[in-house]
């Protein structure tokens, strides 16, 4: 029989985790018609979370694994640890705070059965609480799209089901600065979406505060795209070209046409135009240097050159 692995990253959730498992996750998993292994990843919690996880028992799933990370590595890494341990034919990842409703897990599984390799939960637009988070997430996706990443659907979350084929590819990626959703998008494969309403936390506080989210956003941009660089490069080129044209125009006006426009062509003006021209050149040369760095960055990420969708291919040699 096929098996589904359910990976839950858990960090300082002693107040809510028992409720989440007993009242939300387990009842939902009990209805799944496949074998289920539950993988609880304790991300170096400082409270009683790990003890609660280790003493947790249930007959509704076939195994409960607990991974205890030695310290807090962050949710992205906790997910990676869980994905590496997972043995199922598909892996579902879900938050431990009850904000992602387990009762819609059957929808994920149904899409997987229909042949999708990745099923991503998309949170409906208006459920983020507070103006700043709302605007922040809007801005994030807007910028992501602006930078040429069109594959990340606005509002997509880490509530996700991934087929074994994709999990294996994901596990083979070696880079350390991981943004799970960006990597999964990069891998490709057939993606389906399930929309859900983001609930309130069962207990405790979200550990992602503004500054953590801000860093996450910056990391996403930098690891996925070089567009910010390109913008400055183009801007520099534009500045140089415009100041060059202006310079030529002034010289013709002054020395060939004998100043019919009565421009005040003196040393400071010449200097200003020349410096602007140089600033533009500097921006371009910085852009070129940065391009080299970004190439080095891409090499050190060490991603595979391509990813093959084995299900859709034919007669390949066995490895
Ligand atoms: N989490 C984690 N490590 C961390 C921070 C959070 O494993 O360093 C877990 C947390 O226990 C929860 C999930 O990741 O299960 C989402 O965290 P949170 O609710 O703080 O984030 P948000 O809901 O704002 O995305
Ligand atoms: Mg949360």
Image (cartoon, grey):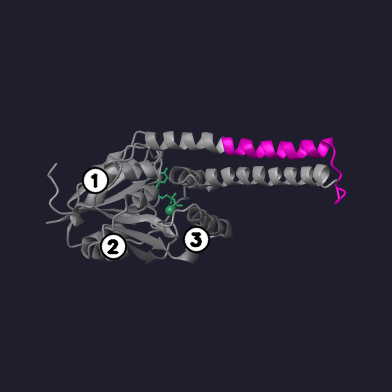
- Label 3: state its secondary structure: loop
Q: Which residue is drawn at 85% across and 45% down?
A: 258
Q: In this view, does 318 lie to the left or right of 93?
A: left
**Residue 33 shows which numbered tag?**
none
Q: Which of marks 1 and 3 is in front?
A: 1
Residue 222 in the image, given as x and y percentages of width and height: 48, 43
Q: Is the magenta stretch mostly helix, strand or loop?
A: helix
Judge by depth and name the residue closer to the eye, 110 or 71: 110
Q: Which of marks 3 and 2 is in front?
A: 2
- Label 2: state its secondary structure: helix
Residue range of the region highlighted in magenta in the rendering:
259-285
The number of numbered badges drawn on the structure is 3
Judge by depth and name the residue closer to the eye, 52 or 88: 88
Q: Which residue is drawn at 35% across and 42% down?
A: 78
Residue 172 in the image, given as x and y percentages of width and height: 27, 40
* Residue of label 1: 168
**Residue 108 shows which numbered tag?**
2
């Amino acid at each position: 029989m096929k098996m589904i692995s359910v990976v839950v990253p858990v960090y300082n959730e002693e107040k809510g985790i028992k409720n989440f498992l007993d009242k939300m996750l387990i009842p939902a998993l009990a209805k799944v018609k496949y074998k289920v292994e539950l993988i609880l990843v304790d991300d170096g919690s400082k409270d009683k979370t790990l003890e609660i996880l280790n003493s947790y028992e249930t007959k509704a799933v076939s195994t409960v694994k607990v991974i205890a990370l030695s310290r807090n590595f962050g949710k992205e890494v906790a997910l990676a640890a869980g994905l590496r341990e997972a043995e199922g034919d598909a892996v579902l990842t879900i938050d431990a705070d009850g904000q992602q409703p387990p009762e819609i897990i059957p929808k994920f599984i149904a899409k997987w059965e229909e042949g999708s390799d990745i099923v991503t939960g998309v949170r409906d637009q208006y459920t983020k609480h507070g103006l700043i988070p709302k605007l922040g997430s809007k801005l994030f996706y807007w910028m992501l799209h602006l930078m040429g990443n069109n594959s990340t659907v606005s509002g997509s979350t880490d509530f996700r089901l991934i087929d074994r084929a994709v999990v294996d590819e994901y596990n083979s990626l070696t880079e350390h600065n991981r943004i799970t959703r960006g990597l999964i998008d990069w891998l490709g494969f057939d993606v389906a979406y399930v929309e859900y309403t983001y609930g309130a936390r069962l207990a405790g506080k979200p550990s992602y505060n503004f500054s953590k989210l801000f860093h996450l956003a910056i990391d996403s941009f930098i690891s996925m795209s070089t567009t910010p660089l390109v913008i400055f490069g183009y801007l520099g080129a534009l500045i140089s070209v415009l100041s060059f044209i202006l310079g030529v125009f002034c010289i013709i006006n002054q020395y060939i046409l004998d100043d019919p426009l009565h421009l005040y062509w003196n040393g400071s003006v010449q200097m200003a135009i020349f410096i602007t021209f140089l600033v533009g050149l500097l921006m371009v040369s910085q852009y070129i240097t940065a391009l080299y760095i970004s190439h080095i960055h891409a090499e050190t990420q060490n991603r595979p050159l391509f990813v093959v969708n084995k299900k859709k291919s034919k007669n390949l040699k066995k490895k």
